[in-house]
Image (spheres, rainbow, N blue to C red):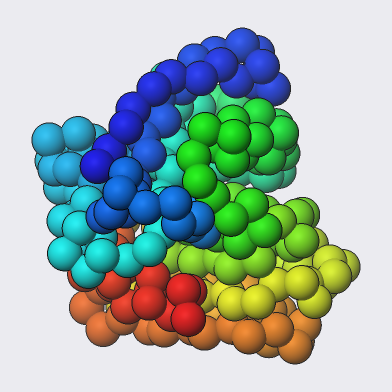
């Protein structure tokens, strides 16, 4: 069952955002409480007809069939211009505009405000409205969503203790995220999953760049002594269909 509503994001200037909540099978018939997985690009998670490019992660079908005891909260991305880059980018990037997008401007830098919305507005609302286990909170995202999920693990490890970062655009803030991992106390992080495909080639960044970028972050995470799993998906593309294929195993890993 998917419930949808809009919520105001005061941390980003008072804009509204669509939220999609998947409730597990049997939710209405029991008094059980559930862990919550927060995911970015919520429009792409559950149904193909809602997805930005016509293909979703297929999570509604998977969770209904598997009866996984998990609530997923999907936060739609900001579709206005390049606001997705701005909100999922923890630090500003002065070069991505002229070098990759062929437009002037500095992008990124709103990631902290976006996470403050999740932590101080959305999470309390979800924990009050639904039967959650507030102490068991997960986060997952792909591409720029993987970058902001990794930042969340470093910034709020006592909250987001289980993270999945798929096909991550670490290159957007490469040096900053590596340094942030180095200086962060990640001892509260229980599990960290990350992956990259061998065919992540996008129109702006090639597969080799994605792979090298993720390998560097993986090395930094390993040095922290936490449980981190890094997979290289042979033939994996930068696309919802690829993440759809990998997500069942990822959820299983995070939930154990």
Give the residue drawn at x 85%, y 70%: 185
Most extreme residue toward the front, as rendered?
Answer: 30
Of residues 149 and 66, the one nearer the viewer is 66
Q: Quadrant of residue 206?
A: bottom left
Residue 149 rendering spot, x and y as whole percentages: 58, 55
Residue 202 seen:
yes
| Residue at the image point whose x is 45% and y is 57% from the top | 32
The quarter holding residue 51 reads top left
- On the question of residue 118 being in view, the answer is no
Tell me where residue 5 appears, x and y as whole percent.
39, 22
Q: Is residue 45 left or right of residue 70?
A: left
The answer to which of 175 and 122 lies nearer the viewer is 122
Q: Residue sitting at 36 percent across and 35 percent down?
A: 20
The residue drawn where x is 71% and y is 33% is: 120
The single residue placed furthest to the top in the displayed view is: 14
User: In screen coordinates, is 6 left or right of 154?
Assistant: left
Above/below status of 112 relative to 161: above
Label count reads 0
Q: Position of residue 60 (x, y in %)?
A: 22, 51
* In the image: residue 62, left or right of residue 119: left
| Image x and y of residue 151, in percent | 67, 55
Q: Is residue 136 above or below residue 89?
A: below
The quadrant in which the N terminus is found is top left
């Amino acid at each position: 069952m998917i419930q949808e509503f809009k919520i105001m994001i005061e941390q980003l200037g008072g804009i509204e955002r669509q939220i999609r909540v998947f409730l597990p099978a049997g939710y209405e018939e029991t008094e059980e409480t559930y862990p919550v997985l927060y995911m970015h690009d919520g429009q792409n998670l559950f149904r193909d007809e809602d997805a930005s490019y016509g293909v979703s992660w297929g999570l509604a079908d998977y969770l209904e069939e598997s009866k996984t005891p998990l609530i997923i909260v999907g936060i739609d991305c900001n579709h206005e211009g390049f606001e997705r880059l701005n909100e999922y980018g923890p630090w500003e990037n002065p070069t991505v505009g002229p070098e990759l997008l062929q437009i002037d401007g500095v992008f990124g830098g709103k990631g902290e405000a976006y996470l403050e919305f999740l932590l101080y507005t959305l999470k309390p609302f979800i924990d009050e409205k639904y039967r959650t286990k507030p102490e068991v909170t997960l986060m997952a995202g792909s591409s720029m969503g993987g970058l902001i999920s990794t930042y969340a693990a470093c910034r709020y490890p006592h909250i987001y203790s289980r993270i999945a970062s798929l096909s991550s655009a670490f290159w957007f803030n490469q040096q900053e995220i590596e340094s942030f991992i180095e200086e962060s106390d990640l001892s509260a992080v229980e599990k960290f999953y990350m992956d990259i495909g061998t065919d992540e080639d996008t129109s702006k960044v090639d597969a080799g760049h994605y792979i090298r970028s993720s390998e560097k972050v993986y090395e930094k995470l390993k040095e922290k002594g936490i449980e981190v799993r890094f997979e290289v998906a042979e033939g994996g593309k930068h696309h919802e269909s690829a993440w759809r294929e990998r997500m069942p195993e990822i959820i299983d890993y995070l939930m154990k």
